[in-house]
Amino acid sequence: MSGSTELGSALRAWRDRTAPAEVGLPSGGVRRAAGLRREELSQLASLSVDYIVRLEQGRATSPSPQVLSSLARALRLSDAEREHLYVLAGQPVPGPGHVSQVIPPGVRRLIDQLDGAPLSVNDAAWNVVLWNPLWAALLGDPTQLSERERNPIWRHFVGPAYSIRQSPEHGARFEAAMITDLRAARARYPADAGLLSLVEDLRGASADFARQWDAGVVGEHVSNHKTVLHPAVGPLVLDCDVLAVPGSDLRIVVYTAAAGSEDADRLRLLGTIGTQVLGPVSAGPPGAR
C-alpha cells in the first residue's frame, strides 16, 4: 500500500471515530455514521472539502506541514498519532526546535466550556491555531483567510484589519508586547522557517514594524479595553486579556464584558446570530489581537 493510500485510510479512520460533540459541533439530524462528515472536518481544519476528498482517496500526495498541523488539531490526535500522520505524509515530525501548535487536552476542554466568551488560542508566533464560534462571530470567520492573514500581528501591521478601536496608548502597548513576543520566539526557535519568514515579511511589508523591531522596543501584555464595531449588534466595549498556558508557548486571548452591562447582552445576542452577518473578515481600524 502506498504512503498516500495509507494516509487516506488513516484520515478516514480518525474522522470516523471523532464524534461531532467532541469537537464542539452539533450532533443532531440524520447521520449515516457517528463520526465527522467531510464537510465538518473541512470546517474544523480550514481546508476545502475537495482537498479532504483527495487526501482520503490518495490523490493529494504532498500535504504541507501547515495542512498536517490543521488536521491533527481538528481530529484531536494524540502525540503518537500526530507523529504517525507526519510520517505517512512524508514530512519531518516537528521537533523541539520548531514552534509547536499542539493543544493540550485540558486547554481544549477549557475552550469547549467557555462558550460564552470569544476566545482564540495562539502559538509562539501568534498564529491563530484555534478559536471558538463566538470569536468568529465577533471578529469574522477566519476559515477563508490564509494562515498568515489570521495572525493578529500581521493583521495589525499589514491587514486585513479588524473592526476594532482602542486608545493610542493601548495600541502602542499592544505593538510593543507583540514585537517582544516575536523576538523572544525567534531566539527560542532559530530554526523555525515559518517564524523567520513571518518576521522578515513583516519587516518588508510594514515600515512601522521594521522601525520598532530595529529600535528594540520592549513591552508586556496588560488587560486592555477595546471597542469592537459589529455590523449586526453595534459597538461592544470589551476587556481583552491574554492568558498563558503553563508549560507551553500557547496563549489564550479572551474577550469579556462586564456582568449585567449592555455589552454583555449584545455578546449573548451575537452568540445567537453567529457569523451569518459578519462574513469571513471585517475591515476597519487596526489594533486587534
Image (cartoon, rainbow, N blue to C red):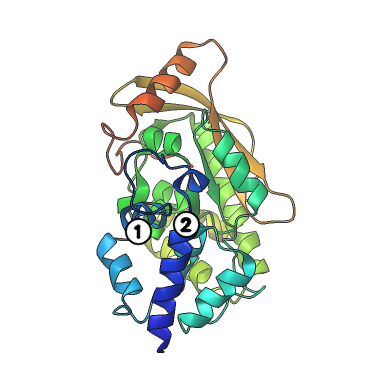
Which residue is the extreme one toward the right? 247
- Nearer-the-camera pick, 27 or 285: 27
Instruction: Point out residue 281 in the picture as x, y percentages from the top left corner.
Output: 31, 43
Q: Which residue is drawn at 43% across and 77% down?
A: 7
Q: Which residue is drawn at 46% across and 73% down?
A: 10
Residue 134 higher or lower than 108, as above or below: above
Instruction: Point out residue 145 in the picture as x, y percentages from the top left corner.
Output: 33, 54
Residue 254 seen in render: yes
Q: What residue is disc 1 on?
A: 146
Instruction: State how many labels appear.
Output: 2
Q: Is residue 235 left or right of residue 80?
A: left
Instruction: Point out residue 21 in the picture as x, y percentages from the top left corner.
Output: 48, 43
The three-letter code of the residue at mark 1 reads Ser
Instruction: Identify the image quadrant of residue 224.
Output: top right
**Numbered label attached to residue 74:** 2
Determine whether the residue tagged by mark 2 lies in a helix, strand or loop. Answer: helix
